[in-house]
Amino acid sequence: MTRETAAQILERIALLLELKGENPFKIRAYKTGAEVVESYPGDIMQLAIDGKLAGVKGIGEALRDKLHEMATTGKLEFFDKLRAEFPEGLFELFEVQGLGPKKIAALYSQLGVGSIADLKVACEDGTAAKISGFGEKTVVKILESIAFRDAHASEFRVDQVYAVAQTMLEALRDHPAVSRAEVCGSFRRGKETLHDLDFLCATKKPEEVIADFVRLPMVEKVIAQGGTKASIYTAGGLQCDLRAVSSAEYPFALNYFTGSKEHNVVMRQRALDKGWSLNEYGFTVVEGKEAPPIPEEIYNEAEIYRALGLDFIEPELRENSGEFEAAEHGQLPRLIELENLRGVFHNHTTASDGTASLREMAEAARDLGMQYLGIADHSKSSFQANGLNEVRLRAQIAEIHALNEEFEGHFRLFSGTEVDILKDGSLDFSDELLSELDYCVASVHNVFNLPEAEMTKRIIRAIENPHVTMLGHVTGRLLLQRPSYAVNIPAIIDAAAATGTIIELNASAWRLDMDWRWWRLAKEKGVKCSINPDAHSTRGLQDVLFGVRAARKGWLTRKDVINCLPLSEVEQALRKGKA
DNA sequence: GCCGTTTTCGGCCCGACTGTTTTCAGTCG
């Protein structure tokens, strides 16, 4: 059993115990246990098998035994018995905004509601509104939340598909009959959410490759299987398509299946203007038309673009939103790469709601080849996240100074805070305290329902504070789960430009906020970006990967992203904008 | 169920907001 599965089982136990009205502290113990399993630095499942979990904080005797059982037998009797008491669909009810354990338990016991489909019926026929604690507004909110969820059905965040994409791609590339393979589609274009994964491979033996593809271990169900293409579902319900083509066709197919559809339309039109027809297999001269000869050998996508008089357009830019004009005039940006990052800001430690200590986070960042790490734990108003008060923050600053002494200039910790932007736009800490920090991230964490004008004013007031270095997750959205609050982004960008405030690109796959669609505007206005993992564990630092994808999609180069600066320059840059 | 300058049992994170109530329970962050 994988650690992800084990963690999910512990989480589900916590939910079921909540439904049963169990002791809340016992429930929290299971939730903590799930987090520990999820983010433990080391092979926790092997430790469980070997019976070496003693001393792992958060895992006591009971969880130790349960983890051992899961790791060795692949199941957990306690969980199987517990979940048999409730319908399977009950879990999805927790995804509905406004529904918690108490309301779900009431719906289930009084109306037999055991799934979102049941819930929808109960809301629409008026029975739900009759339950004590439910009313008209509750029902409306529930229906809204269900509608939002339906609109995004069968969509996945990129972190949910990343491992499958890599594993399948490796399997394809490993295949003796495959010469080249790639993930195409919206995954390759760096989209933040997607419906399926499109794989492409070049081979002389398509049927053999297809047959082996549908037998991969992660394949749950074969939807279709033919001579050159197949579709399957993984256990997680993710659809994966494979197309097998010849080596000569490969660059054309790669281009075609990467899309976007709008980009492809323009590509084909440009080819037609030359008298060529373009499809997923190659160029052909249009019947009866004067046309230049088709380039004889096209081995890669760049040569297709060159044949059409264009610079190579990176997949992330292929949305027909100006990339052709830029490619024609040699004005495409040289997009940022993961390797350009020299450090990261906005990270949490055990002082607030992170799972790793200051030292562990620093060591993990060094191991990733970074030169610096910015700490930004929550401020006191974020009680839920164990936010730091003034005394604890000053203690952390001192601790950071001590660690920096120890690093002797080889690595640098920056002291910061993720300070709450309060309802009126004032900040959770005084200017005096903020001035003692190396930098400050300001974020909204409560009162999401303000009208747009008020929310915009609130955030701009925070931006105008000279101690606010950067603005955190500007819209508060959680992809596929919660829409952004109402806010006027162009007005925020203008305010950031006027005050020299950096805007964060929160790299958590849940957020990717500010959205890639706004970065070109921000860049035009001279606003700098900081790609921030918002890491709550050492593993979380690696989320910068998703942030870089989004930054590339937003046309950003290393020059636009502040944490591409080497240590020797970044400190000054943190101050410069606000000087 | 976990933890502990407690060795064995008491404490474990808090406040705002919402909608339903008529003083507060439930949810969220």
Image: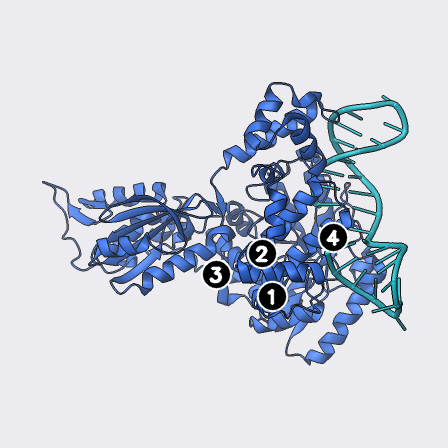
Left or right: A223, with A294 as reference point: right
Tell me the amino acid under the disc marked 2: Ala
Chain identifier of the cyan chain: B
Instruction: Tell me which label, 1 or 3, sits earlier in the chain.
Output: 1
Quadrant in the picture for residue A116: top right
Instruction: Reply above or below: A301 against A511.
Output: below
CB-based contact (under 8 Å), mark 1 and mark 2 = yes
Task: Name the residue tied to disc 3.
Answer: A336
Residue A141 point in image, percent of width and height: 65, 28
Q: Chain of mark 1?
A: A
Q: Is residue A87 visible?
A: yes
Q: Quadrant of the C terminus of chain A?
A: bottom right
Residue B18 point in image, percent of width and height: 74, 31
Does label 1 lie on the same chain as label 4? yes
Task: Name the residue tied to disc 1.
Answer: A48
**Tag 4 secondary structure:** helix
Does label 4 lie on the same chain as label 2? yes
